[in-house]
């Protein structure tokens, strides 16, 4: 089996078509920390993680030691939620402390585009998705998903997927932020603390809006620029050596 280093973001295909993947973080010595579907975060051997499937490296943590330390700090139970706390969210948080999942954001983008084009989100949304910008974003996401399927380097997929991610990531951020806000407010309501419920609802709405419309798009562009730099560095090293 291929050798991996601590800080490598590893993936294996779950289904035969490779449409869904399981993610884990290599922590060295052929050991992987991953989140199971029941939410339990555990350390297993590379062979146990693979379960007979081919393992590939999706990305490399810039701070390998920091990523491993964060992964080990979460060993044990953690709630598993498909949209905002799955195995990919866990690994991405270990790498750069952001909860995001390409599988989730890509599929949310496709679902939104399909719903809008079918007129399910209203006439205004239907007109928007028929425009050039929406078509470019859709093509970007589909091409990125194809790149991930065939195993293109993560930096290449990031560059290809940047136009699509400018739509997909804010959608993911908006849905997760709204879900967390409503959940927190509901907890306060159950405790009978109506003031805190109203306050958390307002604060959450503001925070979610800022995150989805400003912070997330800026991060997507920044990640795209870093990916271009990584590709340039790889080309330079290849030409040099």
Image (spheres, rainbow, N blue to C red):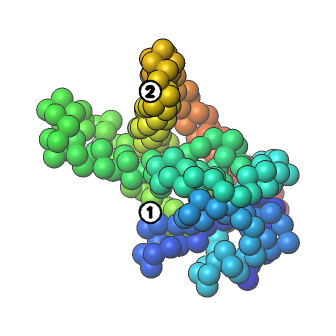
In this figure, which residue is indicated by the disc labeled 1? 146
Q: Secondary structure at mark 1?
A: helix
The residue at the point 69 percent across, 79 percent down is 48
The residue lying toward the viewer, choosing from 227 and 96, is 96
The quadrant of the picture occupied by the N terminus is bottom right
Query: Is residue 98 left or right of 131 when viewed as pictured?
Result: right
Q: Mark yes or no: residue 93 visible.
A: yes
Q: What SS does tag 2 mark?
A: helix
Q: CA distance from mark 1 to mark 2?
A: 44 Å
Q: Position of residue 80 (x, y in %)?
A: 54, 55
Percent across and percent down for residue 34 are: 67, 63
In the image, is 45 to the left or to the right of 179?
Answer: right
Q: Which mark is residue 189?
A: 2
- Residue found 49% across the figure and 61% down from its top: 147
Q: Is residue 116 above or below residue 35?
A: above
Using residue 154 as the reference point, say whether residue 73 is left or right of it. right
| Residue 33 x, y percent position in the rendering | 72, 63
Asked if marks 1 and 2 touch (Cβ < 8 Å), the reply is: no
Most foreground residue, 44 or 154: 44
Q: Quadrant of residue 112?
A: top left
For the point 28% across and 45% down, which residue is it?
A: 113
At label 2, counting other C-alpha atoms closer than 10 Å, the crowd grade (few under 14, some 14-19, many 20 or more) is some
């Amino acid at each position: 089996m291929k050798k991996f280093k601590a800080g490598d973001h590893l993936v294996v295909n779950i289904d035969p078509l490779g449409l869904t993947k399981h993610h884990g973080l290599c922590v060295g010595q052929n050991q992987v920390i991953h989140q199971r579907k029941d939410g339990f975060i555990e350390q297993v051997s590379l062979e146990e993680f693979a379960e007979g499937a081919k393992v590939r490296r999706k990305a490399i943590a810039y701070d390998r030691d920091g990523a491993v330390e964060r992964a080990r700090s979460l060993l044990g139970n953690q709630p598993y939620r498909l949209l905002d706390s799955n195995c990919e969210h866990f690994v991405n948080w270990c790498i750069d402390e952001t909860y995001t999942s390409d599988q989730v954001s890509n599929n949310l983008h496709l679902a939104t585009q399909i719903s809008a084009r079918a007129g399910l989100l209203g006439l205004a949304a239907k007109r928007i998705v028929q425009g050039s910008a929406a078509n470019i974003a859709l093509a970007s996401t589909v091409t990125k998903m194809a790149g991930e399927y065939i195993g293109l380097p993560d930096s290449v997929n990031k560059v290809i997927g940047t136009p699509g991610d400018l739509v997909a990531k804010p959608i993911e951020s908006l849905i997760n932020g709204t879900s967390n806000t409503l959940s927190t407010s509901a907890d306060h309501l159950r405790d009978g603390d109506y003031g805190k419920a109203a306050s958390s609802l307002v604060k959450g709405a503001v925070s979610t809006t800022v995150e989805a419309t400003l912070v997330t798009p800026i991060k997507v562009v920044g990640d795209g620029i870093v990916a271009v730099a990584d590709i340039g560095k790889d080309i330079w090293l290849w030409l040099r050596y």
